[in-house]
Amino acid sequence: MINLEWFRTFKTVFEKGNMTSAAESLYISQPGVSLHLSSLENHIGFKLFDRLPRKLVPTERAKLLYNSIIDPLLKLEEAEQTFQKNNDEDRPTLTIGMCFETFQLILEKHIPHIPANLILEFDEYRKLLEKLEQGLIDLVVTPRKIEKRDVTYTAFSQENILIVAGKDTDTGGFYKAQETGNPSQVLDWLMQQKWYGITGDNEHLKRFWKRNFDEHPAFRPNYIVPNIHSIIRCLSHSSGLAVIPDFLCLEQIKEGVLQPLWKGHTPLNNTLYFARNKQELHPDLINLIENIIRDEMP
């Protein structure tokens, strides 16, 4: 049976380039490093390094092996660090699911003062709620209320979805189109603009378009950026449009670097919920985090 320590040693030698540095990094002797490498080579049946003076050069097969094992090894090392015995054994750990932008705007600055270890997960709301039901997450902040047997929901705020325009956007044509009372002219103007979207499914854009034009958007955003805060920063210095929740950009609207262009013929509003598992282990800490989020919501 293969020894996982052989792989750890191989990874370190591959990255360090020589046995001496690898031995120092692994806190083992140089003969120990040599033994691990030779054992691994004997097990897999091919040479991993060409031995040069003071240097080990990986073979092509070594490069393939390294690329195959690096991600699993890093995950194992992360798990080892997470679960190793330390002085914080009695400190509870909470996992919270929410959108990245809400975390960055609302919760991030409070993390050092929360008396618990925190793990933040950013994913689709459906997946986060499934993990909550399975007991893998302790709290989810969500605009979606999906009925699940062991999950309770508490409404705490509301987000309004609207089209915002960058500070340099000429919006005169939009208001002229609105004055005609003809939705098709509004749509035509919107379709001629440059649009920002996020990596993923751009759910806000799709739902806004469906509600106001009874169709899915017939275009792909011109600029796909990592998250909504990236959109806000880009629009604050240029022209263009995006569909985003209002609470994420109230400061920029107040400063005049974003224009709140349109809430739609039929405004799109989402209720925000705290979702919790009925079998939760740390209700007091979850209450504390909920209160922080409530107090910080604009």
Image: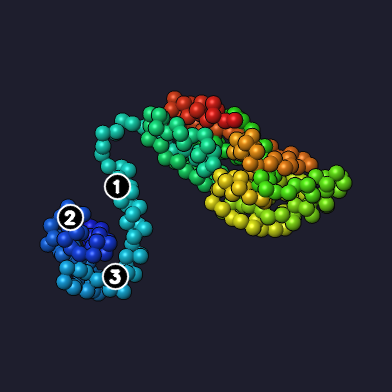
* Image vertical order of residue 218 relative to residue 135, above or below: below
Query: Looking at the rendering, in which quadrant would you find the N terminus?
Result: bottom left
Q: Circle 3 — which element?
A: helix
Of circles 2 and 3, the one toward us is: 2
Measured Cα–Cα span from mark 3 to mark 1: 25 Å
92 or 18: nearer the eye? 18
Question: Which residue is labeled 3 in the image?
Answer: 62
Q: CA distance from mark 2 to mark 3?
A: 21 Å
Q: Which residue is mark 2?
A: 24
Q: Between disc 2 and disc 1, whose residue precedes?
A: 2
Judging from the image, what secondary structure is the residue with disc 1 in?
Answer: helix
Spot occupied by residue 98 in the image (x, y as percentages of width and height): 52, 40
- The image quadrant that residue 29 belongs to is bottom left
Going from N to C along the chain, the mark reached first, 2 or 3, is 2
Residue 3 seen in the figure: no
Amino acid on which the number 3 mark rests in the picture: Ala
Residue at the spot 17% in from the left edge and 55% down from the top edge: 24
Residue at x 61% of width, y 56% of height: 223
Callout 3: few (<14), some (14-19), or many (20+) C-alpha neighbours within 10 Å?
A: some
Regarding residue 122, the answer to whether it shows in the image is yes
Picture residue at 46% right of the left edge, 26% below the top = 288
Label 2 residue SS? helix
Residue drawn at (32%, 56%) of the image:
73
Q: Amino acid at mark 1?
A: Glu
